[in-house]
Image: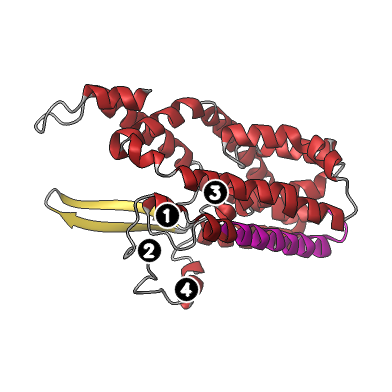
Amino acid sequence: MLGLAAVAIGPVGEAEGPNWLTTLLTEVGKGYVSLLTVLVIPLVVTAVISSVARLREVANAARLAVQTLIWFAVTALASVVVGIGVGLLSKPWLTAGVSAANAEEPGRVGEWTAFLTGLVPSNIFGLTVRVSQSDAGVTASPSFSILQILLISIALGVAALKVGPKADSFVALAESALAVVQKVLWWIIRLAPIGTAALIGKAIVTYGWSSLASLGVFVLALYLGLVVVWVVVYPLVLKLHGLGVGQFYRNVWPVISLGFVTRSSMGVMPVTEQVTERNLGVPRGYASFAVPLGATTKMDGCAAVFPPSPRSSSPSSTGSS
């Protein structure tokens, strides 16, 4: 409604720029995204360090850690296959206005070694700054690589694990910082309805309702992929381990419902830990390792199934949440 109202008001003029409602939607949406982005680094660093260091409290820690990573990889691979399969069947790019030329194979493909070299951090914080020059002057745009930050955090966590008691203060600091960051993140998550409304309204103003409606197949394909993972992939994994599917979903329903509403696995991480320990009976030491690591690195929905289109060159198919 806000986006349609902004479109109805129309632009003020070329000299004045967009109308007041469009400007408001733009700034509120940008502000909400910035609030989420600014917490990514401290949340990932503290969560991963805490989770890896917690392995000292778990018996057979090495075996459990390896098994956890293996099943993380297996279910993530299955989710990616589901996403690609749904994309190939539905072909959402055909209804999104992508021309046949743009839907062809890319003319240039990056080297696989670039992925490996990209993992090597250029500094301890994994931060980079891109400098660009235009008619308006020189601008600097800071950015970060989440993979580099993960590697740094895992290395620090493993080092703390190896150092032993001497690293207790360091681990305690990371856990305290994680609790503080989670509290701030929860405050931001409560602003999600406002931020989401602003972002959707701005999208309608920018692309038009007809352009967004053409992405309907894409949205349906995305949710279909999520349903397949939910009712096929996960039940198979549960059955392989002799667990009841219905009982499992009843136990984790508080996390599923809250995660669906907030759209943030990291934001609901405290609830995930509580449900994992109380409802599923997982020991606290192992839950403190698996949950933060999974919430920051293991996202079968937004990072594996999304986007379901493997070849679409439309802007909506290149992003990731």
- What kind of residue is marked 4? Thr
- Mark 4 and mark 3 lie on one chain; the one further toward the N terminus is 4
Residue beneath the point at 54% across and 26% down: 190
Q: Amino acid at mark 1?
A: Trp
Q: Which residue is mark 1?
A: 93
Q: Earlier in the sequence, mark 3 or mark 2?
A: 2
Closer to the eye: label 4 or 2? 2
Could you tell me if the residues under marks 1 and 3 are in contact, i.e. CB atoms within 8 Å? no
In the rendered structure, which disc, 4 or 1, sits on the residue that comes first in sequence? 1
Q: Circle 4 sits in a helix, a strand or a loop, which is it? A: helix
Q: Which mark is residue 221?
A: 3
Secondary element under disc 2, as helix, strand or loop, is loop
Tell me whether circle 1 and circle 2 mark residues in contact (CB < 8 Å). Answer: yes
Q: Are marks 3 and 2 in contact (CB under 8 Å)?
A: no
**81 inside magenta stretch:** yes
In three-dimensional space, the C-alpha distance between marks 4 and 3, rounded to whole angstroms, equals 34 Å
The one nearer the camera, 176 or 128, is: 128
Q: Tell which circle, 4 or 2, labels the residue nearer the N-terminal end.
A: 2
Residue 289, above or below 35 = below
Other residues around mark 4 within 10 Å, as few (<14) / some (14–19) / many (≥20):
few
Q: SS of the residue at dot 1?
A: helix
Q: Position of residue 48 (x, y in %)?
A: 64, 52
Image location of residue 23, percent across then percent down? 26, 28
Look at the image and say whether residue 309 sits in the magenta stretch: no
Name the residue that disc number 2 marks.
103
Mark 1 surroundings within 10 Å by alpha-carbon count, few (fewer than 14), some (14 through 19), many (20 or more): many
Magenta-tinted stretch: 58-83
Mark 3 burial class by Cα count in 10 Å: few <14, some 14-19, many 20+: many
Farthest residue to the right: give it.
242
The N terminus lies in quadrant: top left
Residue located beneath label 4 in the image: 117
Kind of residue at disc 3: Ala
